[in-house]
Amino acid sequence: MKEIEGKVALVTGGSRGIGAAVAVRLAEGGADVALTYERDTVRADAVVDQIKNIGRRGLAIQADSADVAALTAAVDTTVGTFGGLDILVNNAGVFIVGPLDDLGPAELDRTLAVNVRAPFVASQAAARHMTDGGRIISIGSNMAERATFPGFTLYVLSKTALVGMTKGLARDLGSRGITANLVHPGPTDTDANPADGPNADAIRGFTALGRYAEPRDIAATVAHLAGDGGRYVTGAVINVDGGFTA
Ligand code: NDP
């Protein structure tokens, strides 16, 4: 018996990178998986094909996380299509970095809308449908613990907000048997942070393991929290960062 057999999951930003790895890993664990994406229909459909090849139901939903109505509708579509919702993974994020003076109100609003408002809105909407055993797992960043480089003020600001949100959700939802946790990836080889990018060697040098994570390394921890391993874990922040913050 697979640990999350028959559960229903929704992963935001599941067309590429960490979100795609999480979607596939949850399907391997036995879940039916819906995923949202912003633009890349081709890659979103390819992830759904992978989910179906595993033998689970999959669904791609175009929904900009900054659009509250679209995001809420994605939750409702997931519930309507699969008959419930047990696992929400708040993964979609934007990475807007640069010198402090270049980060204006538009960059601030976009960062807060996608990285902070969306996880709150999706968690609130998902929790309305969840029952005992429900799981809310958000993807933050280990930079919430160590900013490391200049230029990251907005990004770190947004990811740090998820620490508070996760602790609050744990308290709000604990009496219903629903857990909320936050996974903090370190450098992970994706389009947003390629392991062969211009600053990759410097970034790698901060890790104890001397390498980038693969997206599946983050997905494995999410799957652990989604399954029996997460039964008594809530309000927690878990670094999956190769010792970057050690
Ligand atoms: P990628 O850029 O590789 O992928 C981003 C995914 O999110 C895509 O599926 C993209 O969809 C989707 N997405 C982006 N913006 C939106 C939006 N507004 N609405 C809906 N979907 C959206 O990112 P990563 O996989 O690297 O990052 C995933 C998460 O992990 C983020 O929250 C990031 O902050 C966090 N993280 C990543 C680290 C890393 O080193 N990679 C380190 C620490 C944290 P589409 O394909 O349509 O564009």
Image: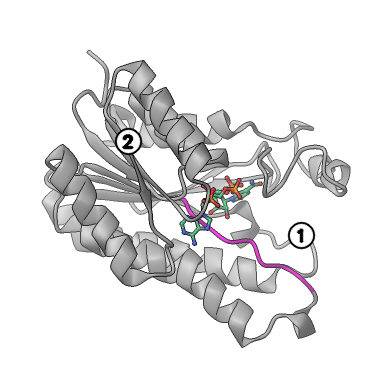
Residue at far top of view? 1
Name the dominant secondary structure of the magenta segment.
loop
For the point 37% across and 26% down, the residue is 51
Picture mark count: 2
In the picture shown, does residue 119 fall above or below 48? below
Disc 2 or 1, which lies upstream in sequence?
Answer: 1
Mark 2 and mark 1: Cα distance apart in space? 30 Å
- Quadrant hosting residue 188: top right
- Residue 226, numbered circle: 2
**Callout 2, which amino acid?**
Ala
Please state the horizontal and vertical placement of residue 69, each as a whole percent of the image: 29, 69
What quarter of the picture does the C terminus occupy? top right
Rendered image quadrant of residue 158: bottom right
Instruction: Where is residue 230? Give x, y as percent.
Output: 32, 36
Q: Residues within 10 Å of mark 1 (few under 14, many from 20)?
A: some
Q: Nearer the viewer, residue 47 or 148?
A: 47
Judged from the image, the secondary structure of the residue bearing numbered disc 1 is loop
Q: Give the amino acid at mark 1.
A: Thr
Residue closest to the eye, 174 or 76: 76
Residue at the image position 70 percent from the left and 63 percent from the top: 147
User: Would residue 95 be counted in the magenta stretch?
Assistant: yes
Instruction: Give the residue number, with chain letter if any, for mark 1.
Output: 148
Residue 52 visible, this angle: yes
Instruction: Decide whether residue 226 is among the magenta residues.
Output: no
Q: Is residue 23 left or right of residue 104?
A: left
* Residue depicted at 38% across the width and 62% down the height: 119
Question: Over which residues does the magenta segment extend?
Answer: 91-98
